[in-house]
Image (cartoon, rainbow, N blue to C red):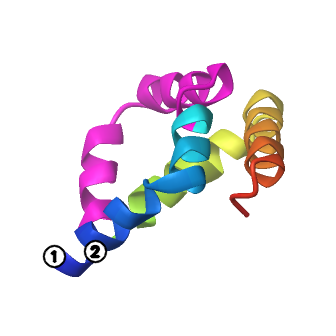
């Protein structure tokens, strides 16, 4: 767990860290969080993912992406991540 925290800290430094902060603060990212929260259970899914079980979070994302609005939102965020050099 300590190693994971160090990896996360190093990821948030420098240019990529700034790009991640910009992307996370974007309107699209905030809309995504709002849509996930409206489904309920986000906090529990995020806690499980932090412990290594991302299945709940992935299920929520799959449900979200099955809607046209959700799919478009995820596509925009993905495009922004690519333009920022994150993927």
Which residue appears farthest toward the front when viewing the image? 14
Query: Would you call the spot at circle 1 few (<14 residues within 10 Å), some (14-19), or many (20 or more)?
Result: few
Q: Is residue 70 left or right of residue 24?
A: right
Q: Residues within 10 Å of mark 2 (few under 14, many from 20)?
A: few
Considering the whole magenta stretch, tell me its main secondary structure.
helix
Q: Quadrant of the N terminus?
A: bottom left
Q: Which residues are magenta?
A: 24-51
Residue 4's tag is: 2
- Residues at marks 1 and 2 touching, judged by CB atoms closer than 8 Å: yes
> What residue lies at 55% left-to-right and 43% top-to-bottom?
18
Q: Position of residue 85 (x, y in %)?
A: 75, 57
In the picture, measured across the screen, residue 37 lies left or right of residue 73, that is left
Q: Between residues 40 and 9, which one lies in front from this camera angle?
A: 9
Q: Secondary structure at mark 1?
A: helix
- x 64%, y 19%: residue: 27
Quick check: can you spot residue 46? yes
* Magenta-colored stretch includes residue 41: yes
Q: Is residue 40 magenta?
A: yes
**Quadrant of the rendered structure where residue 66 is?**
top right
Query: What numbered label is drawn on residue 2?
Result: 1
Question: Where residue 67 appears, x then y in whole percent?
Answer: 76, 35
Q: Is residue 13 left or right of residue 5?
A: right
Question: Which quadrant of the figure contains the C terminus?
Answer: bottom right
Residue at image coords 73%, 40%: 77
């Amino acid at each position: 767990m300590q190693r994971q925290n160090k990896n996360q800290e190093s990821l948030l430094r420098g240019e990529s860290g700034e790009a991640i902060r910009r992307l996370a603060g974007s309107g699209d990212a905030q809309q995504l969080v709002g849509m996930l929260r409206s489904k309920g259970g986000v906090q529990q899914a995020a806690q499980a993912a932090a412990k290594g079980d991302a299945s709940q979070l992935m299920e929520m994302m799959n449900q979200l992406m099955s809607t046209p609005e959700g799919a478009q939102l995820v596509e925009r965020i993905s495009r922004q991540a690519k333009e920022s050099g994150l993927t």
